[in-house]
Amino acid sequence: MNAKTHSGNLPPQNQKIKVKEKQPAIVNRLACATLEGVNAKVIEVEATFTKGLPGFSVVGLASNDIQEAKERVKSALLTNDFVFPPLKITINLSPSDIKKNGTHFDLSLALLVALNKNAFTEEGLFVFGELGLDGRVKSSTLLFPLILSLKEQGLIRRAIVPLEAIKHLSHISGVDFIAVETLSETIQLLKKKEFKAHTKQFSYEARSLEISGKPYYYEESFESDFAEVKGQLIAKRAAMIAAAGMHNFFMEGNPGCGKSMIAKRLKDILPPLYEEELLSIAKHQFLDGQTPDFKAIRPMRSPHHTATSASIFGGGSGQAKIGEVALANYGILFFDEIPHFSKNVLEAMREPLQDKKVHIARVNAKIEYQADIMFVAAQNPCPCGNLLSKTKACRCSEVEIKRYQNKLSDPFLDRIDLFVVMQEVNIDDKGDISSEAMHKAVISAFIKQKERGQERLNGKLAENEIEHYCLLTVDADKILEGAIARFGLSHRSIASVKKVGRTIADINGHEKIEKKDILEALSYRRRK
């Protein structure tokens, strides 16, 4: 027989075989960020769960503190009754060519693992937080700089953050903060999508004034008083002018004549700050490991002359860190005994004095820091310090004096607006003007600058702004033309004289720079 037989296990020909549909893999994503220098880069955190040997790996140029996060995440999840699936867990930090660091990635990693069976999409939701082993959500020093940088770039509108960080983060307006205390609380938030922004009113505990609808903040606490500086009327007048316009200021004089005293009192009479400047100062303090108090006081940094170039300008091996110049942003950088600083440091200072920025080039990155500083320097007239003394004999040879004074190049000194040679202290000298009186004059000049529509103070004006704001009377213009012909002033020196003259006119209450103002400005030029 040719008939075919069947075993009975095959289905009838008219019956269709059911094929189990393949479920699409769930790939959840959350947004986080990392710092490059002082600027934040958005990082997308994504997770997959695939068949294979059970494991937990984080890829995408993650630093050691992120790799260590795996253990913190495991412990936090296990203590919250989470059972790890017998799958291979892979978490990717994208883009993969950027080095990531920081413990604030913990919370986003844990959420992606905990919600592996729940597909969710939350566009624009950033998640920040370090995890304790028991699941508590902790803050970190990088949170404030990260979120402020993202906000300045217009990249963030809402974020899940630790509750303990709200006291600092609430100063950043325009971002909805969802404050959490524990991992389990955060998991429930994502499941239910109940994102309630934390509302907390904050106010700067400082005096304020409003100009053209914009508030400016300042303090009236004088730790030390200019009245304690005996004599030195010209130097104190120059210090007030320097403060009113944030001009670079240079003092030369015998040891003990009051150079350091004047420099240290300058920070108490500086102009008011607006909110963005206060936040930028706080950001740099966080990056330096300090906890800011958000007081309306401009910073003052005074590195020692033995400080290295990396400590002053930033850098270091691996990730470049900020230095003294960046930490003095919107404040004072004071170099005492400036000729003792290395030649490399002094010549490198020309860039921040001119461009208000610092560029650091490394193999893996090129980083730019803002350095809008008021530079203040002091030096003795010679190595022994007695060259200008009427009572003490100078022990230095002409060669030693010339070598000492030649440490500072003309291009560097050309970036200084005011020079003062201070007199030797006399027993009859008395304190005449107080810090409070000087500060009132500075604020009065500040108001005039802002009412003219200046975004920057006189000492920081660009070339085109100088032509617009630094207007001279006919007599003042003739005086300046004569000085240019007589002293051979460079374009930078002319601009500097005009800026100083504008500040003096503001202090004197003059609408234009008058003859008296320009003569005083010329008196503060360096004698070659």
Image (spheres, rainbow, N blue to C red):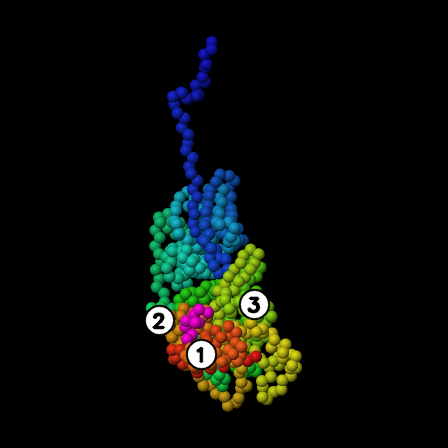
Give the residue pinned by disc 2: 211
Tag 2: residue type?
Answer: Ile
Nearer the observer, 53 or 2: 2
The kind of secondary structure element at disc 1 is: helix
The answer to whether residue 376 shows anywhere in this view is no
Dot 3 and dot 2 residues touching (CB under 8 Å): no
Amino acid residing under circle 1? Asp
> What residue would you read off at disc 1?
477
The boundaries of the magenta stretch are 463-471
- Whichever of callouts 1 and 2 sits on the residue coming sooner in the sequence is 2
Q: Residue furthest top?
A: 1
Look at the image and tell me in which quarter the C terminus lies.
bottom right
Please name the amino acid that badge 3 sits on.
Answer: Ala
Residue drawn at x 63%, y 76% is 403
Looking at the magenta stretch, what is its main secondary structure? helix
Residue 398: image x %, image y %? 65, 81
* Quadrant in which residue 389 is drawn: bottom right
**Is 71 in the magenta?**
no
Q: Between residues 407 and 452, which one lies in front from this camera angle?
A: 452
Disc 3 crowd, CA 10 A, few/some/many (<14, 14-19, 20+): some
Q: Answer with left or right where residue 485 lies relative to residue 384.
A: left
